[in-house]
Image: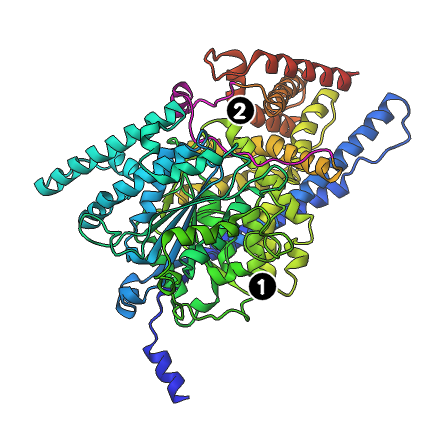
Amino acid sequence: MGKNHDDDRDYLPLFETKSSKNCTQFRLFVGTMLVGICSIFVYRLWYMPLPTKEEGVVLIIRIIRLWAWIGVFLSELWFTLYWFVKIVVRWNPVYRHTFKDRLTLKYGEKDLPGVDIFVCTADPKAEPPLMVVNTVLSVMAYNYPPEKLSVYLSDDGASDLTFYALLEASKFSKEWLPFCNKFRVEPRSPEAYFTKAPQPLDDDHRYHWASIKRLYEDMKIRIESATKAGQISEAIRKENKGFLEWDFVSSRRDHQTIIQILIDGRNPKAVDIDEHPLPTLVYLAREKRPKYHHNFKAGAMNSLIRVSAQISDAPIILNVDCDMYSNYSESVRDAMCFFLDEKKGDEIAFVQFPQAFENLTENDIYSSSLRVIMEVELRGYDTNGGPCYIGTGCFHRRESLSGKTYNEASKVLLDWKRKNEDDEGISAEALEETSKVLASCTYEENTRWGKEMGVMYGCLVEDILTGLMIQCRGWRSVYYNPKRKAFLGAAPTTLQQALVQHKRWGEGNLQIFFSRYCPLKHGYKKIPLGLRLSYLVSLLWSLNCLASLYYVIMPSLCLLKGISLFPQVSNIWAVPFLYVFFGNRAYSLGELLMCGGTCREWLNYQRVWLFKRTTSYFFSFLDFVLRLLGFTDAPFIITAKVVDDDVSERYERELIEFGTTSPMFTILTTLSLLYAWGFIWGLKRLVFTEQSLVLNPFTLQTVLCGLLVFINLPIYQAIFIRKDKGTLPNSVIYQSIMLTLVTCSIVHY
């Protein structure tokens, strides 16, 4: 007892957790909303328009009204269920804070664990090599012992252009890393630093700044020239033996394993200009053959896990997307505060940092910041058992990715010995050769990889599924959102990109919900109930499309037919409808403002929220059903990180980019025309009548259509006003007009 007491007295936590201070007001609001929702249900059941003894047209209209009423009631019931799971993640969010000074006092630099850093790219056209190596350089320059860092670039495009860019970056790092350490540079992506940071005033700093910038610009010109030419010159190929590998590459989908250790951290000669050691740097293009499924990013991650175990075998793994550069050089130490905490560290499988983006417009035109998810919902996940794994900006405990349960794992992070210390006598060339088999097409056959080990296969959101499986094996996860964003990436710059991205996410989440890994079932007695419900916030995205489409379409159509679905404004039953609708909108506005957003950003958020529910999630639901029937196979779509100059200009001006034909745009345009037609018809029923607005049964319905018209104003501008290249194509407009006319004609008939 005395020993334990002494241990507790000497224990200094490396992180602390605080609960939100404003829970009482929020819970009172939830209580009033619940009263309003129950009142709506009472109204729907009490005033349900049951058929009477009328005959003919009157009876048909009453039957139509009954079914429309039931549909609206079911939609409202669904909205309530989804609202409940969103309340679960907002009930008691937690905030984490690290003590890096205590970490430094407790552990010397030599005692810190090694970190293997994975950067994944797949297409040099969609993901330019210069952008990729900027990300690589930013993570090589972490404020962490460089001999304990190993950076691996997985190139699923097997591009010699990407390899050349990495080769150039390996040379530039000898100058860049000392500069970063000497002047404490932030951020440590050269492109981001020289774009954002002003020229220093200090003479010594300014001299080095100008010198390193000149070196970077020279490297940038060489990489961009090669990328523009689409090939590597013979003179450059002769400078490095690694280019010989591309003599045997048939195509990006048919080639052998390529592994090149560009910087061998074990080699005492691998130093920068100040004679400090450099991180290990490895290029990997795993083997691909037409007859073997390569499992996209999940397959690349699993190859990296195995190859890194052979070369460096660090107990901690960080993975980042190639466009998500490190914006804070202390992030590794922040993560170590969680893993190395004496009491709570051993149960932590991964530390998830938020996604953040540097190219957002002032009011986030496409709602790409994911602000509410990152600032609110993931904190709620953390309260309930740990955040989900979101695929990038995540530090993993290697053991948790090996398929081990928490009880099976060693739990002692510092009881490690780096692989490269054991294998100091093995040359880099020998390591390259022995590692190739680990990235071959056939290595995973008849193994647990992708099923129980590593990153999971068979799902479009392999990251969410992988994190869920790790948590179900008894591990915890932690969400950490520092004041300075740890990583910054590139957000979609067109509406098409944003909607397609959410379509993939929506379908992947739906796959999990209807699979044997659904957290409600698979997580039973494995993870807390609150965490199982928290996962439903994203897993049910696609199913929201059904209720949302019904609720925005049916009121407009019923206005055309003269069918009322809501009470009169003068009726006491109108109060809960008005309170629930506007109360929710007011809360969401306040939530976004507290997260640092703006009022116009909130309006864009509402617009994109509607667009996603009526297009992205509808098509993800449709594709999921077709996949079940065996008609389609979902491809993995890479979001392009480069756009034309005129597209960028419109993006900066916050003009929504249409510009191309798409079934999604056809649906959005058709719906917007339908809202407008319903609104006009509703106004007719309000104006050309003797009833006042408060007594008219169509007032609330018309207001709803009016709000839908208002939120779709950018579409009307694209139809009738805009003349630039980003407007809606004529074919989309004509198709939508025809669909609207046909629909309205059927309803009128």
Q: Which region of the structure is painted magenta? A: 631-659
Q: Is residue 645 magenta?
A: yes
Q: Residue at x 26, y 35 (%)?
A: 196
* Residue 401 coordinates in the image, percent (x, y): 52, 58
Query: Does the image show residue 541?
Result: no
Q: Nearer the viewer, residue 249 or 632?
A: 249
Q: Secondary structure at mark 2?
A: helix
Q: Secondary structure at mark 1?
A: loop
Q: Residue at x 38, y 62 (%)?
A: 423
- Name the amino acid, label 2: Phe
Q: Where is 431 relative to 16, above or below?
A: above
Q: Residue at x 61, y 54 (%)?
A: 533
- Name the amino acid, label 1: Arg
- The colour scheme applied to this rendered structure is rainbow
Q: Which residue bears the numbered disc 1? A: 473
* Residue 414 coordinates in the image, percent (x, y): 38, 69
* Residue 542 coordinates in the image, percent (x, y): 63, 39
Image quarter for residue 15? bottom left
Q: Which residue bears the numbered disc 2? A: 710
Q: Which mark is residue 342?
A: none
